[in-house]
Amino acid sequence: MVDHRQRGGGAPRRPSTDVAVVDVLLGVGDARRILPAIGTAVQRGRPSARFRSDMFARASHTPLVIEFMAGFHHFTGSAWRPVAPLTRQPVDLNGVTLFVPDRSELIAILTAFARPKDLKRARLLEAG
């Protein structure tokens, strides 16, 4: 399991944005195929009190830091629950199609996390 607290270290210059990290949720099998193909190594660690994943990797050689979490779980106060979005919407990012949960599901996920930064994002999504 991996600690999802903020990590330090040098990084390339990044665009000005409120988003510091892009989180990618994926299955363990997908992570085993994709991460080596993009030159991103799985990191060892321990779970935090609120989040854990079976596999974790961090790509910091990109314009934004990308954190890959396979088998991602959130502690709800009584049990660990998998975070596995049920909806998918395609988003084009410079000619690359990414899939994200629909707005209402993303708001629900962020609200369940209950961290100030997640609640702020949820409010921005509700307003937008």
Image (tube, rainbow, N blue to C red):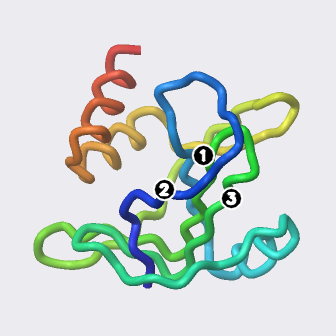
Q: Which residue is mark 1?
A: 88
Q: Which residue is mark 3?
A: 59
Instruction: Please say if 19 is above or below 49.
Output: above
Q: Which mark is residue 23?
A: none
Q: Residues within 10 Å of mark 2 (few under 14, many from 20)?
A: few
Residue positioned 35% across, 37% down in the render: 107
Residue 97 image point, x, y percent: 79, 39
Instruction: Please say if 66 is above or below 76.
Output: above
Return the residue found at the far left: 78
Residue 109 image point, x, y percent: 34, 49
Q: Amino acid at mark 1?
A: Arg
Residue positioned 33% across, 15% down in the render: 127
Mark nearest the camera among 2 and 3 is 3
Circle 3 — which element? strand
CA gap, disc 1 and disc 2: 8 Å
Instruction: Please say if 85 is above or below 14.
Output: below
Q: Earlier in the sequence, mark 1 or mark 3?
A: 3
Q: Is residue 18 left or right of residue 124?
A: right
Contact (CB < 8 A) between labels 1 and 2? Answer: yes
Q: Earlier in the sequence, mark 2 or mark 3?
A: 3
Q: Is residue 117 left or right of residue 6?
A: left
Q: Amino acid at mark 3?
A: Ala
Residue positioned 41% across, 64% down in the render: 83
Q: Amino acid at mark 2?
A: Pro
Q: Which residue is mark 2?
A: 85
Q: Quadrant of the C terminus?
A: top left
Instruction: Please say if 97 is above or below 25.
Output: above
Contact (CB < 8 A) between labels 1 and 3? Answer: no
Residue positioned 58% across, 58% down in the render: 67
Instruction: Give the mark count.
Output: 3
Q: Between 32 and 85, which is closer to the camera in this rendering? A: 32
